[in-house]
Amino acid sequence: MKKIKQVFFNILEVSGPEDRIGRIFDIFLISLILLNVLALVLETVQPIEEAAGTFFYRFELFSVMFFSAEYLLRIWIITLDPRFSHPVSGRLRYMITFIALIDLFAILPFFMPMLNIDLRFLRLFRIFRIFRLLKIVRYFKALNLMARVFINKKEELIMILTFVLFMLVLSASLMYYIENAAQPEAFASIPDAMWWGIATLTTVGYGDVYPVTPLGQILGAFIALLGIGFFALPTGILASGFSEEIRKNKNESSSCPHCGKKLPD
């Protein structure tokens, strides 16, 4: 049994370019995920859904069975990973990791009808099928690089997000008190004014809601100018993070994996 467990572990968790079976499995899984996303998109086209509804259901059934088996296998073999070696607590800790939660959300919508949940809620929950696309993260270095950048820069990004939320509430509140008398429907409350605040701070400017009073227009112009600066900051932070990660990867690839010394050019 331990030998079988090790075989599955090698295929699912540590397969490399030299592991032919693991490579075939990875390619099959990536293809299946992309086909699932394509099916999810095509299902929303009424003529296609009417003509191929049965095929979509059977394909969904096959995919869910495959992804469910994969999910259960990963939970079974994960104890071979030193980080999750304990048979109970190790598996529980693995089940709440980001990648394991993605695997769970990829199959959960299919089983929701069995729980007798309100069908209106179920239709909303089906959107979680798009999480199958995120399963590809474990197979692409570029996506892993992006995840590392967000993790490394999370403090700076959270700080910027907090400041933007503060400015959103402040600008929406001011605009509500300025414009409510002139436009009681468009600026009926501070939460309603937040839609204008989001469109203005992001400099999108949909034009469906806008100030008409002179003071409101001055405030709107000021908020729009601030928005340009606020949303340039996260771009700079992420660009810096990507630069650091790429430099780190170059240094690691040019160093000996055993002693850490720089390899000759």
Image (cartoon, rainbow, N blue to C red):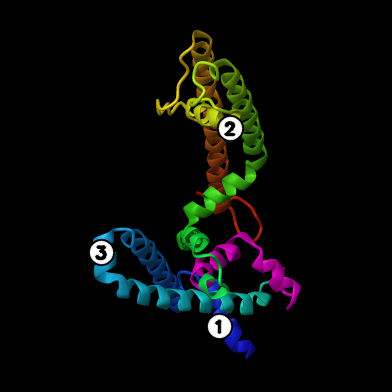
Of circles 3 and 2, the one toward us is: 2
The residue to which callout 2 is attached is: 191
Q: Residue at x 58, y 53 (%)?
A: 255
Asked if residue 11 can be seen in this view, the reply is no
Q: Residue at x 49, y 11 (%)?
A: 213
Q: Amino acid at mark 2?
A: Pro
Between residue 91 and residue 125, name the one nearer to us: 125
Cα gap from disc 3 to disc 2, whole angstroms: 40 Å
Q: Residue at x 53, y 70 (%)?
A: 112
Residue 64 numbered mark, or none = none
Which is more N-terminal, label 2 or label 3?
3
Cα gap from disc 3 to disc 1, whole angstroms: 41 Å
Cα gap from disc 1 to disc 2, whole angstroms: 55 Å
* In magenta stretch: residue 109: yes
Work out whether 215 lies above or below 259. above
Of circles 1 and 2, the one toward us is: 2
Is the Cβ of the residue at disc 3 closer than 8 Å to that at disc 1? Answer: no
Left or right, residue 193 beside residue 83: left
Quarter assignment of residue 57: bottom left
- What secondary structure is found at the residue carrying circle 3? helix
Between residue 27 and residue 215, name the one nearer to us: 215
Q: Label 2: how many residues lie within 10 Å, few (<14), some (14-19) or many (20+)?
A: some
- What secondary structure is found at the residue carrying circle 2? helix
Q: Residue at x 51, y 61 (%)?
A: 125
Magenta extent: 82-111
The residue to which callout 3 is attached is: 48
Q: Amino acid at mark 1?
A: Val
Between residue 65 and residue 188, name the one nearer to us: 188
Q: Position of residue 141 (x, y in %)?
A: 49, 56
Work out whether 262 lies above or below 29. above
- Per the picture, the main secondary structure of the magenta-coloured stretch is helix
The residue to which callout 1 is attached is: 7
